[in-house]
Amino acid sequence: MEEDELINVDNHDNVGAQHSRPFTVRMLESMQSFLDADRARLSIVKLLTDGEWHDLTSLVRVARKYRPIGQVGVGMAMNQIQSFVGFKIFETDGQPVPETITSATQLDSAWRIRDEFMGIIRAVVSTMDSSDQESKLTSTLERVQLQNANRSGGF
């Protein structure tokens, strides 16, 4: 299965034009609309974009500023984000996040965004904080593409 087929993209009238756009642009735009619908999910992702490991309690603490939510709710929100994107973007103690939180050990685990998705997730969060989203989106995507090209030896 191709990488493009795994992602859940909004339906547009012009489907052909949608598939001609780069994967990162489609992912960024669809994640923006998904996270904008729930500020609790956005706050979790914002906290995790620092690249550090965070315990579940700290994720609950930031999400509770926007709605009542507990540890199971945060786990469900993280799984919803991953399902929407189509990739395991979060990891816990070096392992992908499981489908459900099944033990107290998982509740005590440290969580973060996987390195390979950090650039695009940061781009999503930074464009959502901007009032001039279109120009911010373009400059952020250019920066992400330059970083990816640099990592792959494109320059």
Image (spheres, helix red, strand yellow):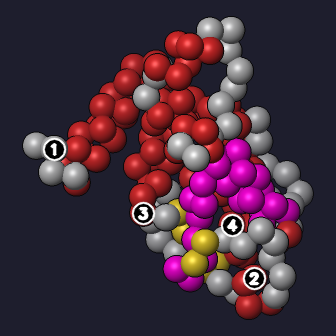
Distance from Cα at disc 3 to Cα at disc 2: 22 Å
For the magenta stretch, what is the residue range? 73-94
Residue holding disc 1: 154
Upstream in sequence: badge 1 or badge 2: 2
Q: Amino acid at mark 2?
A: Leu
Q: Tell whether 98 sits left or right of 146.
A: right
Height in image: 105 above or below 142?
below
Residue 144 % position (x, y)? 33, 41
Q: For mark 4, give the secondary structure.
A: helix
Residue at horizontal 69%, vertical 26%? 10
Q: Nearer the viewer, residue 155 or 63?
A: 155
Q: Which residue is mark 2?
A: 107
Residue underneath mark 3: 115
Whole-Å distance between the Cαs marked 3 and 4? 19 Å
In the image, is residue 110 above or below residue 40? below
Q: Which mark is residue 85?
A: none
Amino acid at circle 1:
Gly
The residue tagged 4 is 59
> Is label 1 in contact with label 3 (beta carbons under 8 Å)?
no
SS of the residue under disc 1: loop
